[in-house]
Image: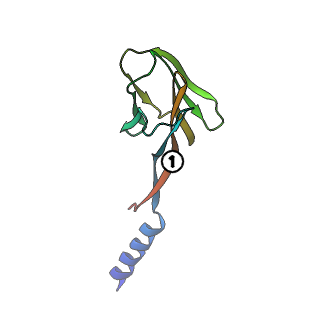
Amino acid sequence: MKTKNILTLAALMSALTTGLALEATAQVSSETSAESPVAKATSDLHVLQMKPMQFRVSYTNPKTNRLSVRIVDAEQRVLFSENKNVSTNYLKYFDLSPLLDGTYTFEITDGNEKYSQSFDIMTQTRRIVAAKN
């Protein structure tokens, strides 16, 4: 009987001294839009997530040989900007892990046409319960 009480007490103490482990991950959801004076059925802008928070941005079939590439936040603050001379296609890799939670947009301007790809960064916290003896 005494042994049973000691085991019950030990189990109760373990349950009370449970620690929490936190792990944060980012989830990115995206939608594509093409904004141009002339409506276009499909976009030549392609954004592909290679690893968590690392993206490959490509733009195929440019109309001009000079592209404007930007990353902007929800308040339209420019976080990245470059003007690039291209002969065939544009390709660049981006590591967006330093960005805080929020909505961001990749923008490519090709002559009179502007293409954009928006995405949300949302930190998800997962709690893991682990018993300590």
The one of 49 and 130 positioned closer to us in this rendering: 49
Question: SS at mark 1?
Answer: strand
The x, y position of residue 106, in whole percent, is: 51, 32
Q: Quadrant of the N terminus?
A: bottom left
The residue under the point 53% across, 28% down is 113
Q: Residue at x 52, y 44 (%)?
A: 120
Residue 84 in view (yes/no): yes
- Local crowd size for mark 1, using a 10 Å CA cut-off: few (<14), some (14–19), many (≥20): some
Quadrant of the image for the C terminus?
bottom left
**Residue closer to the observer: 27 or 36:** 36
Q: Quadrant of residue 18?
A: bottom left
- Residue 11 location, quadrant: bottom left
Instruction: Please give the residue where the numbered disc 1 appears in the rendered image.
Output: 123
For badge 1, the amino acid type reads Thr
Position in image of residue 8 (x %, y %): 39, 78
Residue 43: x percent and y percent?
43, 36
